[in-house]
């Protein structure tokens, strides 16, 4: 997992030199998602029920179910990573997913649009929605929490209007009122029925995001804005553009997740995606991205996403109630946040 911290002075944006002696606690925080994933995997093997001597947790079908289940929240978490690295937050992503699933189903079923026009329109819609939130937050210097909370309500309301508060079922065929059969591939598995298509979309999006964050000037600007916004502005970084862009990316990710959701479950609903924003934020934080901004990685976010999915799966296999699953996830989030705070204090960066 790669992590960057950007130091912005009066000159160009440069990567800060690595410390000669790393704090052991800082190393734990840096790799906490990978450590947690390994521990959850070990716990899964130990506590997994057996059937005819087979460890159910390690069964290929169960592994496929885990990665399929986390694909949508994982896509959202990838977009959320950009925002949190800039010390922002986006609470609207779950509602945007619901809106996107409704618009996807409506365009194909009621509007008669083809696959490509529908996908492009929904992705543009999500991107513009994110840009509007980023613009409002940046231009009027409003807290992202407030702006995106309002965005959550707006997106959910729009979804209710478009859907008429009804499920929009997706049936496939070539006639009116039918979606293109190729759209159903999002709910299928490839490679001898082992790898869900939704997971392939998740991995592809994560790969692109990793390259953007770690190898481009825009990625360096993202770290710079989160590390020290004032210094970044003085050094010539287009802070407002960066902030607007990361919210556009998050909107795009939520729309993409909404398309995948509609394809997997063959319907669109205004209630889709409820609570997804919290799961995505949890995956990002567990993945080592600092809530204070300026540090994080996509690899950590992917590991955090899979860790949460694996934890939920092993609890389900042991018939643990959903309430206990939520409590376990909450405990992990708090622990990750506490570790981040301790590291900042030890580095003399506490606020």
Image (tube, helix red, strand yellow):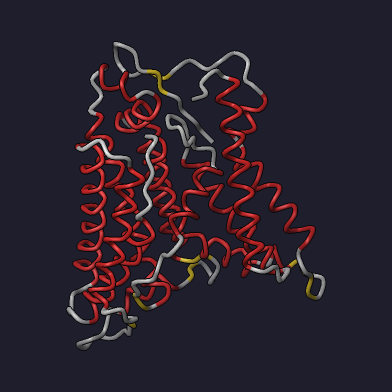
- Observer-nearest residue: 171 or 79? 79
Figure quadrant of the N terminus: top right
- Residue at left offset 28%, top offset 73%: 160
Judged from this view, the residue extending furthest toward the bottom is 175
Q: Position of residue 153 (x, y in %)?
A: 31, 60
- Residue at left offset 19%, top offset 37%: 139
Up/down of 182 relative to 91, above or below: below
In the image, taking residue 12 as reference, residue 311 lies left or right, namely: right
Up/down of 37 relative to 28, above or below: below
- Observer-nearest residue: 192 or 23? 23
Judged from this view, the residue extending furthest toward the right is 53
Q: Position of residue 175 (x, y in %)?
A: 21, 88
- Residue at left offset 23%, top offset 54%: 129
Judged from this view, the residue extending furthest toward the top is 10
In the image, taking residue 315 as reference, residue 348 lies left or right, namely: left
Q: Position of residue 315 (x, y in %)?
A: 68, 64
Q: Quadrant of residue 186?
A: bottom left
Q: Position of residue 19 (x, y in %)?
A: 56, 15
Q: Quadrant of residue 200?
A: bottom left
Count of marks, rendered view: 0
- Residue at left offset 21%, top offset 42%: 135
In the image, taking residue 320 as reference, residue 96 lies left or right, namely: left
- Observer-nearest residue: 335 or 150? 150
């Amino acid at each position: 997992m790669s992590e960057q911290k950007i130091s912005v002075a009066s000159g160009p944006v440069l990567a800060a030199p690595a410390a000669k002696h790393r704090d052991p606690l800082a190393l734990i925080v840096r790799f906490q998602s990978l450590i947690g994933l390994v521990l959850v995997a070990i716990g899964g093997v130990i506590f997994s029920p057996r059937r005819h001597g087979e460890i159910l947790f390690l069964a290929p079908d169960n592994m496929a179910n885990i990665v399929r289940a986390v694909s949508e929240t994982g896509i959202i978490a990838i977009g959320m990573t950009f925002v949190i690295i800039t010390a922002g937050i986006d609470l609207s992503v779950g509602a945007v997913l619901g809106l996107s699933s409704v618009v996807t189903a409506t365009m194909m079923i009621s509007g008669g649009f083809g696959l490509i026009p529908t996908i492009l329109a929904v992705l543009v819609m999500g991107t513009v929605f994110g840009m509007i939130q980023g613009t409002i937050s940046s231009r009027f210097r409003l807290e992202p929490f407030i702006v995106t909370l309002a965005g959550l309500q707006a997106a959910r309301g729009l979804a209710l209007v478009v859907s008429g508060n009804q499920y929009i079922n997706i049936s496939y065929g070539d006639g009116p009122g039918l979606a293109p059969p190729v759209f159903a591939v999002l709910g299928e598995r490839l490679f001898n029925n082992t790898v869900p298509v939704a997971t392939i979309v998740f991995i592809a999006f994560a790969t692109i995001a990793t390259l953007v964050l770690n190898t481009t000037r825009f990625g360096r600007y993202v770290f710079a804005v989160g590390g020290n916004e004032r210094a970044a502005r003085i050094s010539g970084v287009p802070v407002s553009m960066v902030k607007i862009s990361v919210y556009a990316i998050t909107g795009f990710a939520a729309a993409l997740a909404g398309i995948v959701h509609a394809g997997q479950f063959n319907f669109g609903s205004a209630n889709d995606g409820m609570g997804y924003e919290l799961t995505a934020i949890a995956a990002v934080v567990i993945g080592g991205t600092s809530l204070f901004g300026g540090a994080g990685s996509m690899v950590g976010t992917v590991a955090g996403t899979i860790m949460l999915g694996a934890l939920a799966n092993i609890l389900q296999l042991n018939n643990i109630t959903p309430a206990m699953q939520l409590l376990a996830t909450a405990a992990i989030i708090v622990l990750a946040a506490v570790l981040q705070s301790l590291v900042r204090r030890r580095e003399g960066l506490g606020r």
